[in-house]
Amino acid sequence: MRERKNVFNNIDWTLIILYLVLVLLGWVNIYAAVYNEEHKSIFDISQSYGKQMIWIASSLFLGLVILLTDARFFSTFAYIIYGLTIFSLVVVLAVGSEISGSKSWFQIGSFGLQPAEFAKFATNLALARFFSTQHINIKELKTRLIPLFLMGLPALLILLQNDTGSALVYGSFILVLYRMGLSGNFLLAGALVVVIALSTLMVGTVYVMILLVIFAIVLFFFMKRIKRNIINLVALLILGIGFTYSVEYAVENFLGDHQKTRINVLLGKELDLRGAGYNVNQSKIAIGSGGLVGKGFLNGTQTKYNFVPEQSTDFIFCTVGEEWGFLGTFVVISLFLALLIRIIMLAEKQRSDFSRVYGYGVAAILFFHFLINIGMTIGLVPVIGIPLPFFSYGGSSLWAFTILLFIFIKQDTNRNALL
């Protein structure tokens, strides 16, 4: 009993409160998103909000179990947990159920579980375990390749499930590698890759290739340092041209027609308000119609009349915008930013490398989901179908995000206990 008392005394209650507030607000907005006159009770388990109540209760129980678990359990069994989730990702490819075009669910009656959600915290555990071993030097090639393998394997398996959105989340771990000492040049290179890819999609492969050649010539004649490294310049030019061609090839051969249309709509090359652009257009109408203070709880017309598809899951943020207005969205965004800042602050205070790396992984995953999900609803990024943490309807995502966060909270209690 004495050890248990110390655990609860050392909990960072700021994180707990932020978590509870976000989960509660999410539940209320799920209720608003699917509300109808025939099912008014928020505790009606035949409706999404009633089911979410069960997921919330079970998530709180999971959080409690994690807090009562020895913090060393997660570092000791990190690779085993990672291995089990990789195994589940392989199995779901063989026997999983296909929902919304993705074969990524274990379906048992009305109960569904998505292993891809749990692979995120498992990968974070594996990365934290790797970087907490002795004699790790991020400047060594091996030290870069092993984390890339740990990140890339689950991402590849999830891509095979046709769940591109969840696979892209693993790119957020690059921020963790940067925190561990990876050169900023890699982030710059990543930014250039994104710019070249977007330019290729917007203006075409040939034009981008010509621009790359012109840019290389300008560098050669105006930078003396480049003249001394002409071989490297030529190699980079060839690599850039090859990548430009690969972008067009990948889009034409690996993306479905609906995905191509979504990208074209986002880039302004197509206007498809009844097809691929419908969701985003209706979402922007809903958010914009909320004005400063919103239309009021349960008074959202876009929401009430189901103009916005997936309004309780991927597009839950538009319910906030319509019913609570600018002030409501400002509060929700502020809560998420407060959560992220608090996690980063605590991560910096950790006394163990495992806890510190894991904390930054938590912040990276939550930040990616937060940024992309809200970006989807206001038309700034393509619709790739990822939930808003703690807010969107869904048991797998809520369980996974709860486990992700509470493992860090547990690691932090261990840090406090040692002070």
Image (cartoon, helix red, strand yellow):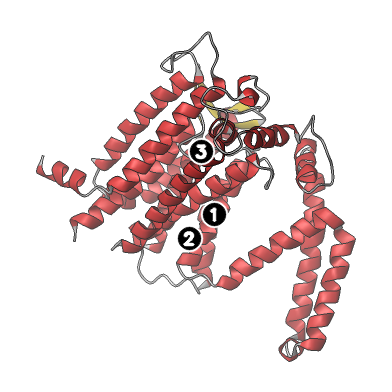
SS assignment at label 2? helix
* Left or right: 34 in relation to 241: left
Q: Amino acid at mark 3?
A: Gly
The dot on residue 379 is none
Residue at x 25% of width, y 57% of height? 415
The dot on residue 172 is 1
Residue at x 45% of width, y 25% of height? 52
Task: Looking at this view, name the residue that lies furthest to the front.
Answer: 292
The percent position of residue 325, horizontal first and vertical second, equals 56, 36
Residue to which mark 2 is pinned: 176
Instruction: Please determine whether, in this image, residue 102 is positioned above or below residue 252.
Output: above
Residues under labels 1 and 3: Cα distance? Answer: 27 Å
The first of marks 2 and 3 along the sequence is: 2
* Labels 2, 3: front one: 3
Instruction: Please determine whether, in this image, residue 394 is positioned above or below residue 125.
Output: above
Label 2: how many Cα within 10 Å (few below 14, some 14–19, many 20+):
many
Instruction: Please determine whether, in this image, residue 244 is positioned above or below residue 374.
Output: below
SS assignment at label 1? helix
Residue to which mark 3 is pinned: 328
* Left or right: 12 in relation to 7: right
Residues under labels 2 and 3: Cα distance? Answer: 31 Å
Label 3: how many Cα within 10 Å (few below 14, some 14–19, many 20+):
many
* Labels 1, 3: front one: 3
Residue at x 65% of width, y 19% of height? 305
Label 1: how many Cα within 10 Å (few below 14, some 14–19, many 20+):
some
Residues marked 1 and 2 touching at CB (< 8 Å):
yes
The percent position of residue 44, horizontal first and vertical second, equals 44, 14
